[in-house]
Image: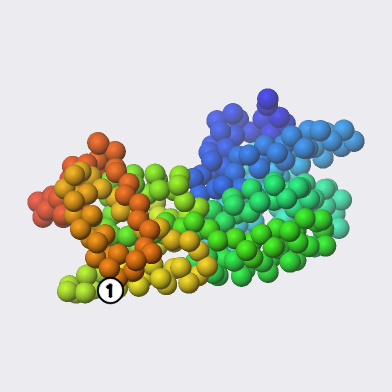
Amino acid sequence: MKNSIYKYLSEEIVNDILSKWNEPHRYYHNIDHLNYLLNRISSINDLSDIDKDILIISSYFHDIVYNPKKSNNEEKSIELLNEYTQIPLDIRNKCSLIIKDTSSSEIPTDELSKLFWILDREIINTDIGDLIDYEHKIFKEYQFVPYDIYKKKRIEFLKTVTKRSNHIDHLISYVEKRKPKIGIYAGSFNPYHIGHHDVLKKAEKIFDKVIVAFGNNPDKEKRKINVPSCLEFHQVDEYNGLITDYITHIENTGVDVTLIRGIRNGIDLDYESNQLSFIKDIKLDTKILYIPCDKKYEHISSSAIRNLIKFDESLINKYLP
C-alpha cells in the first residue's frame, strides 16, 4: 500500500530508494526493518498529517546509506535526503534532525525525534526469541570482523542498553556463550572467480559465517591479493604455511570450524581426498565439507583464466564475480 512519501517523490524514485534497502549486505537494516517502522507509524492515530509525513520520510532515509564499516552513515543519509529537493526544506530539516538523533545513545528531547528513536529501537524490548534472531542478523552484518573482536564489542554495546530492556541481560549471556559455526573457504583463488563464488554462496546457507582465506604458496614469491568487491563485507584473510595452523588460529577465537573445499568434478574429489589424508595426519579433528559448484561452472579454473590473460585480458571479465 502506498504511503505519503509518494506525495513528494515519484514511484520511480521511491523504487530506487527501496533498492538501497535491499542491498545484499543488509540482514537486519533491510526492507523488513523499514516496513516495520512504516507499519508502526501508520498505526499511530494521534499524529498530525504533517508529523506522520515527517516520520515516514525519516523511515525511508534514516538507514538509506548503511555501511557497517563506516561511522558516518547518518551524515551520508542526511546528505542523500537533501538531494531530493522535491521534499520541502522544512520537512527535510526536521527529518535530518530525526536521522541525526538515531545515532545517539540517549533519548532525544525533541518529541517527534524521541518517538522515532523509540520505534527504531523497539527490537530491544521484544522477547528473547526475537532478540536472538536480531543478534544473528547483526552478526551477519558484521561478519567481516573476527569473532573474538565482534563478541567483545557487541557485549560492550549491549550493556549500554540494559536499562531499557528486560531481556538484554539474557541476550548478553547468549552472546557470551555462543559458539558460531564458521566455515573456512580456503584456496589460492588466483584469481577468485564465479565458480568460487558459487561455492561460497552455497556454504553461507550452511554456516553462520564463512571466512574466505587466501593461501600463499611458500615456494613462490608472495603475491598481492586482489579481493573482489563482492567480498567487501566478508572476513577475508591471508594465511601462510599449513591450513591446519590457520584453522587452529580461528578456533582459538571461540568458534566451531569446518574447512570448506570446492570441487568441480571427480578429478578434484580424488585430489581433495588425498589432501584430506595429510590434513588428518596433522590435525585429526579437522572437519571438512566438500561443496560442488554448479555444472555450468565446472569448466572454470584459475589456471585457465590466467592463461586467457596472456592473450586478451578482456576475455576473463565474464568469469569474475
* Residue 35 image-quadrant placement: top right
Depth check, front residue: 312 or 231: 231
Q: Is residue 258 above or below residue 40?
A: below
Quadrant holding the N terminus: top right
At 54% from the left and 53% from the top, the residue drawn is 140
Across and down, in percent, residue 64 comes to 60, 47
Residue 88 in view, yes or no: no
Residue at 37% over, 49% down: 200
Q: Decide: few, some or many residues near mark 1? Use Cα within 10 Å; few <14, some 14-19, many ≥20.
A: few
Q: Is residue 114 above or below residue 5?
A: below
Q: Position of residue 126 (x, y in %)?
A: 76, 47
**What is the three-letter code of the residue carrying label 1?**
Gly
| Residue drawn where x is 18% and y is 51% of the image | 270
x then y, percent, for residue 187: 28, 60
Which one is nearer the viewer's eye here, 83 or 287? Answer: 287
Q: Is residue 217 visible?
A: yes
Question: Quick check: 292 left or right of 266?
Answer: right
State the image coordinates of residue 239 (x, y, percent, origin top left): 33, 70
